[in-house]
Image (tube, rainbow, N blue to C red):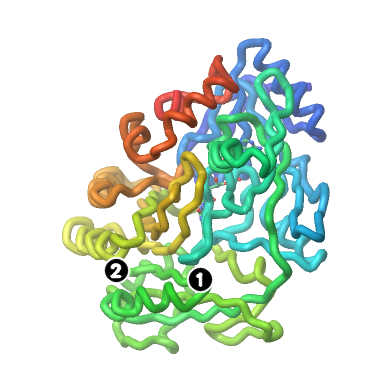
Amino acid sequence: MMDAGGHWRNWVGNQSCIVRHRGAPESEAALSEMVREATSNGLNVRCAGSGHSFTPVALTSGLHLTLSKLQGITNIDAARKRVSVHAGTTINTLGKALKANGLSMINQGDIDSQALAGALTTGTHGTGLTLGNMASQIVGMRLVQPDGRVLVINDNQPDMLDAARVSIGMLGVISEITLQVMDSYNLHEKLWRCTFDECMEQHDELAATHRHFGFFWCPVPESRHCYCLPDTSSVSTTTSLSDVCEMKTIDITDRPPMESAFEKIAYSSEIYPIEYVPNFHELEYAVPVKYGKQACMEVRKLMLEKHPTCIYPIEYRFTAGDGGWISPFFEQDSITLSVSGEPGTDYWDYLKDVDDILRQFGSRPHWGKLHFLGAEDVAALYPRARDFKALRNKLDPEGRFLNDHLRQLFG
Ligand SMILES: Cc1cc2nc3c(=O)[nH]c(=O)nc-3n(C[C@H](O)[C@H](O)[C@H](O)COP(=O)(O)OP(=O)(O)OC[C@H]3O[C@@H](n4cnc5c(N)ncnc54)[C@H](O)[C@@H]3O)c2cc1C
């Protein structure tokens, strides 16, 4: 049963829509029936996760779904270390359930409040030169089709899995995901500050010798406060507070939990997330790893020389390539570089200048973060874009799972 419509906005408040109907199904069967009813009445359908995307990916004027009542683990295959999870489960909830079962996700990003399907379908990633994005951990999915049928995909259909793992919700409403996980592990996190030059000198070695390495470049002291970064002055190799990098390495350890000023050991899912408040509008692109340092140096120069008032940090991380047809990391080991504009200011010239720089390196955007891609760029940047569009059109010929933003890119 679909509910009356209303207004929806995303977490940070830069995207909103007026929807005809809302739905919060409590079972896959109820979800299927809602989708069937909506499409048979000529309505389009989008499902939101926790609304943490900065792009219009979750918007619709038709049926707007949430799977917040479809949460929890449905099956654990202990021998193969695989878990099946309702698609609306938040990453935080999943982490706790895995811990209770002696398991951990292979990698996670900076927050854990996203719905699992929402995070995976945009290509959400953490950091680690040898670690793929979170969707690369998918080994099976169930997707509700426009007529309410359930399409089941498993690892006997590698092509379908690669099409669906990052698909921005365009191949159906995901009702369940099966993930490859691993035995539970503790992580040891270390934080410190150094100059930008020191960071660039140590970049290759730190990326190669730690499971996770990433940093925030802060042009001015206030930059740290934009993202609530801790004050690492006491473990700094520089006395400067400007033009510095807030560094982080994380590695698996057998040691028990501990916490000191800039070092912490805890269960994996408790180490990954950091705190953010909705005070930024973010752009992020995946840059081929061989161009990472050059791209970072050029964006830093742009910020210092042309946009000195843009002081949100650059966040810089690593992600291994994967097979996802429209994954930002398709067959390309990458660094990810993000910058942010301050809500309420006109930051578009700045973000476009960053886009101009990153474009030169063949970079691909995070689908959940601001970008400037058009349909021609999609065709040029994703070798399997044509296959993806053909499959999307076959599964959903009337484009019921598209919205204006996605139709322009993939219609
Ligand atoms: C503070 C903050 C920190 C972040 N940190 C990171 C990070 O560390 N790494 C990173 O890569 N990204 C990060 N992101 C981006 C974020 O992970 C992505 O935008 C992610 O897609 C948001 O998940 P969500 O559950 O909020 O989904 P939403 O933003 O609500 O939706 C994202 C997409 O998923 C679709 N969708 C949701 N559920 C379903 C479903 N069941 N079936 C089909 N489609 C569905 C929606 O229609 C939409 O297209 C961050 C964002 C914020 C605001």
* The label number, if any, that marks residue 334 in the structure image: none
Instruction: Identify the amino acid type marked 1.
Output: His
Q: Nearer the viewer, residue 272 or 154?
A: 154
Of residues 93 and 165, the one nearer the viewer is 165
Question: What crowding class fits label 1: few (fewer than 14 Cα within 10 Å), some (14-19), or many (20 or more)?
Answer: many
345 left or right of 174? left
How many other residues sit within 10 Å of disc 2, few (<14), some (14-19) or many (≥20)?
Answer: many
Which residue is denoted by mark 2 in the rendering? 219
Secondary element at tag 1: strand
Residue under label 1: 212
List x then y, in percent, for residue 283.
Answer: 38, 49
Q: Disc 2 residue type? A: Pro
The percent coordinates of residue 236 (x first, y second) are 39, 86
25 sits to left or right of 308: right
Which residue lies most toward the left here?
305
- Quadrant position of residue 172: top right
Image depth: mark 1 or mark 2 in front: 1
Image quadrant holding the C terminus, namely: top left
- Mark nearer the N terminus (1 vs 2): 1
Residue in front for this viewpoint, 70 or 4: 70
Q: Nearer the viewer, residue 178 or 121?
A: 178
Residue 303, visible in the rendered structure: yes
Residue at position x 54%, y 42% in the image: 166
